[in-house]
Amino acid sequence: MKPARLTLALVALAVSLLAVPAFAERNLVPTLDRSFKVCRDRPAEPSWMQEIPLRQVYQRVLVQDIYRTQNLERIVESGNCDCDTRFPSWDAAEGVFRERHASDERWEMLQASDAYNRRANDVRLEAKAICETAGNW
C-alpha cells in the first residue's frame, strides 16, 4: 500500500473510531425512570427480586420470564389486552416460581427460563396483534 493511501486509511479509521463513542454517548441515556408509553400504572417487581444478589440474578430472570409468559398467554386466551390483563400483579408468577422452581439448581432454572421464553415466543405475535388493536403495545 502506498504511503498516501495508508495515511488516508489511518485517518479514516481514526475518525470512525472517534465518531462511534460520540454517537453512542449522545443516544444512550440510562435512566431508572419507570415511565411507559402504554399501561403506565404497571405493578413494580416485588422488592425481593430487586434486592437479589448478583450471583443469584437468574432467579429474578426466571420470575420475569414466568410473568411475561403468563401475561402473553392470558392475552391470547382471553382475546383481551387491557392493562390489567397485560400487566397484572406479580403474585401468580411468584407463586409458580415458589411452587415449582425455588428449590431448583441454577442450571434447572436456566432451562426453565428457556422453556418459558419459548412458550412466550410461540404466542407473542398473536398477543401483539390483540394488543396493537387495543392500543396497548
Image (spheres, rainbow, N blue to C red):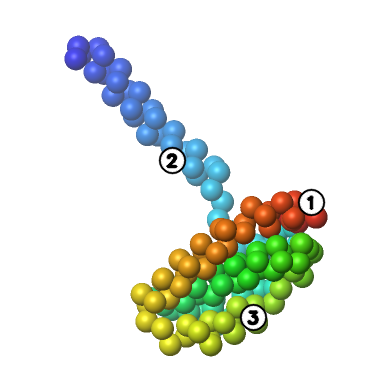
Residue 68 visible from this viewpoint: yes
The numbered mark at residue 133 is 1
| Residue type at the position of mark 1 | Thr
Residue 89: quadrant of the picture: bottom right
Disc 3, SS? helix
Q: Give how far apart the Cα atoms at labels 1 and 2 are.
A: 39 Å
**Circles 1 and 3: CB atoms closer than 8 Å:** no
Q: Nearer the viewer, residue 99 or 87?
A: 99
Residue toward you, 79 or 7: 79
Real-space Cα distance between discs 3 and 2?
43 Å
- Identify the residue at image location x=65%, y=82%: 91
Viewer can see residue 57: no
Disc 3 residue type (three-letter): Ala
Q: Which residue in the structure is indicated by mark 3?
A: 92
Q: Is residue 50 left or right of residue 112?
A: right
Q: Secondary structure at mark 1?
A: helix
Q: 89 above or below 128?
A: below
Q: Amino acid at mark 2?
A: Pro
Q: Along the polypeptide, which appears first: circle 1 or circle 2?
A: 2
- Measured as percent of width and height from the top left, residue 69 is found at 59, 67
Rounded to the nearest angstrom, the CA distance separating label 1 from label 3 is 26 Å
Tell me if 3 is positioned left or right of 73 in this view.
left
77 is higher (above) or lower (below) than 29: below
Among the 4 quarters of the image, the one containing residue 84:
bottom right
**Disc 2: which residue:** 21
